[in-house]
Amino acid sequence: MLIHNLSYHINKYTGEIVKRQRVKVSCDECGKIKEVLYGDYKRRKYKKYDFCRSCSNVLGVTGCKGKKSGQKTKIKVKCSQCNKSIMRYQSDINKCKNLFCSQKCSFDYQYSKNYNFLLQNKSMLENEIAYLLGVILGDGTITYGSKVAKRIYIFCDSIDLQSINNLKDIMGKIRVKYTVTKNRESCTVVAFNLPNCFLDHCGINFIGDKFKANPVPNSRYIKNINMATGLFNSDGCLLYRQNKYYVLSFTNTVKTIADSLCSSLDANGIYYRESHRNKGRGLKDSYDIYIERKKDISKIFDMSSVPFKLAKKSR
């Protein structure tokens, strides 16, 4: 409480103590006296009690003025992850939405919050996962993220808004947090984390160069036509040849990725033509896949549950 003293300077117009002078305040709990500016004291006037720093910590209030809680000890609460009983001050309870008994529980809570929906609903999200695998194998890069998850970057053409929107929709459906940044005028990067156990399940748990890793996706997702859609949307294009007909083409330097696309097309009854180009000394070989028949192009467009938007090029 404020200790009144006749020596305080009084404002002759308002009759109040001048704000820019020191006044004495006593702690309502232990009686300790300290000096503060009256202006600072007045700004906290809406508080009910005055406490020193040590008493406010014990009582679980913040600042030297606060509402007296009547609790001089820690309060028993439940851990948000394991429901174990823990003791915490009222100030900690007020500041934190979730309380944990250990760092491990805090980590497990965040892990389950970020990935439980994806890990528990893999069968329901098969189309979305298959498409995401195709895009990762096409335009994606897998890097080290943490001990339990890897960071994935997908590089998209800034003009190709459909592909960017497709990825945003997929991230929303599998409930994984992501960021979208524009590196240059022509490049937009979609970045997100996926757990190692999920990447093991999908068959793409590697870091760095796909040419050295030679990834082979899970056969369950290879049979899904949406993986082929993801590969065509990333490393494919729709060619308009001789102003007469369309050809759906795909090019990649990794043989296992090209073989996975062929297996996906075979599993869904789509006819294609495959070619291998040897580019010579010092250059990686190229594996090309073409879908030339109109009915096969229409079939893959109709079977895919993800919008099939490709840039048209003339030749």
Image: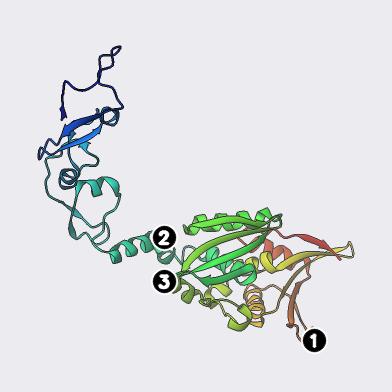
Position of the C terminus by quadrant: bottom right
Label ID, residue 114: 2
Kind of residue at badge 2: Asn
The vertical placement of 29 against 157, above or below, is: above
Q: How far from the left and from the top, in percent, is residue 187?
A: 68, 59
The vertical placement of 200 against 16, above or below, is: below
* Image marks 1 and 3: residues in contact by CB distance under 8 Å: no
Kind of residue at badge 1: Gly
User: Spatial distance from mark 2 to mark 1, Cα to Cα?
Assistant: 46 Å
**Direction from residue 294 to residue 161 in the image, left or right:** left
Which one is earlier in the sequence, the residue at label 1 or at label 3? 3
On the question of residue 66 being in view, the answer is: no
- Specify the quadrant of the image occupied by residue 207: bottom right
**Direction from residue 120 to residue 171 in the image, left or right:** right
Report the residue at 19% width, 50% height from top: 89
User: Judging from the image, what secondary structure is the residue with disc 2 in?
Assistant: helix
Give the residue furthest to the top: 13
**Direction from residue 48 to residue 98 in the image, left or right:** right
* Image marks 3 and 2: residues in contact by CB distance under 8 Å: no
User: Spatial distance from mark 1 to mark 3, Cα to Cα?
Assistant: 41 Å
On the question of residue 34 being in view, the answer is: yes
The residue under label 1 is 280
Label ID, residue 148: 3
User: Judging from the image, what secondary structure is the residue with disc 1 in?
Assistant: loop
Q: How far from the left and from the top, in percent, is residue 125?
A: 49, 63
